[in-house]
Amino acid sequence: MKLDEGLTYEKLSLDITPLIDIVFLLVLFFAVSTSFISGEDLDALKANLLSLSDDKGSLQNELAAANKRLAELDINIVSLEQLRDSQALKLRSLEGRVVEAASKNEQLRQNIAKSGSDLDEAKSRFDQTYTQLIDERAMRSKQEKVVFELEDLLAEKKNEALELELGLNAAVRMGKELEAELAEMKVEAQVLEVDLDKYKKIAELDREQVERVLRAQQDLESDLGAYLQNRQLGIKREKQRITLQLSDKILFDSGSPDLKAEGAALLREVGSAIKSRLGDLQIQIGGHTDNIPISGKNSAWPSNWALSAARAVNVVLLLEEDVGVAPDLLSAVGYGEHRPIADNATAEGRSKNRRIEMVLVPR
């Protein structure tokens, strides 16, 4: 509104300018025609007129600029009016939207109010449900506790059942093992009964053989008493066997397997006594040496094993050939230095270890 007022005022001011010029010219003309104005004043008026003419030119320029500005302002006014009309349309549209939004807001308020009511109802139902849930949880906790206790009890009973089953299986296995052992024991008992009968018979035979060996020892001691006294011969008895020990001094030269004359005579007499008194006893000839190596004495006999075996064989041959002892009753074994009867660390012990043993046993 203020813009329109300013433009109206400027138009009015520009419209009265020609009137001023006309009035000024009339006054000037009146003054000149009546000689009312002096020359000086006339010059002054002329000067003023020129000045006014200049001012008029300046004012005309300003008027042209103002008119140009006015035209621009008219264009701006039209643009602003168009903008105003556009804004008015937008305003009316906004007012419609505001009305619509107000309606929607009212609907929303109603919905909110309803939702609030529903929320209160839902809260009430939630509180009720929550209370029920707490109660159910408490009940469930009790039930779970009971279930855990029952599971523990079940596991314990399962373990007991497993142990009982294992024990039963063990008992069954043990029963089977006992049955097997019983069967084996029955078989063993039968075998033992058979063995017992056999051993009873053997015991009876043993008693007879022991008595027989004892009598044989007595007979040998009687027949060979002279050799026992001078310690060329030794006799000992162990249950069913008689062992005659003969020193190698009387039988062999050192390191030699060949029998000396006196040794051969002793063996013939001993063999004859055994043959006449104990003709059915086994005669086992064993050769023994000390632990001094024989290889240095006679290179033909590389070890005491070989020397002891050769001496035992020569005794067996003499008993068979000179005395006539049956060959099936004779056997020869060489033991070397491995079955000593005395300490090889002394000369006396080594002398005892160098021997021929004649072991007499029942067939």
Image (tube, rainbow, N blue to C red):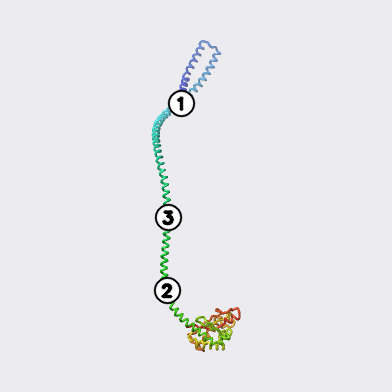
Which comes sooner in the sequence, label 1 or label 3? 1
Q: Is residue 55 above or below residue 172?
A: above
Q: Quadrant of residue 287?
A: bottom right
Check whether the beta carbons of the residues at disc 2 and disc 3 lie within 8 A of each other.
Answer: no
For the residue pair 208 and 342, the one nearer the viewer reads as 208
Q: Position of residue 81 (x, y in %)?
A: 43, 27
Count residues near mark 3 (Cα–Cα under 10 Å), then give few for <14, some for 14-19, many for 20+: few
Q: Disc 2 to disc 3, how far (Cα)?
A: 51 Å
Residue positioned 53% across, 17% down in the render: 48
Measured in 3D between alpha carbons, the distance from the residue under mark 2 to the one under mark 1, in whole angstroms, is: 148 Å
Q: Residue at x 46, y 26 (%)?
A: 73
Amino acid carrying mark 2 in the image:
Ala
Which residue occupies the foreground of this view, 37 or 127?
A: 127
Secondary structure beneath disc 2? helix
| Mark closest to the chain's N terminus, 2 or 3 | 3
Task: Tell whether label 1 touches label 2 (CB within 8 Å).
Answer: no
Q: Which residue is mark 3?
A: 153
Q: Is residue 331 visible?
A: no
The mark found on residue 189 in the picture is 2
Q: Nearer the viewer, residue 2 or 337?
A: 337
Identified by mark 3, the residue type is Leu
> Which is more foreground, mark 1 or mark 3?
3
SS type, badge 3: helix
Q: Position of residue 190 (x, y in %)?
A: 41, 75
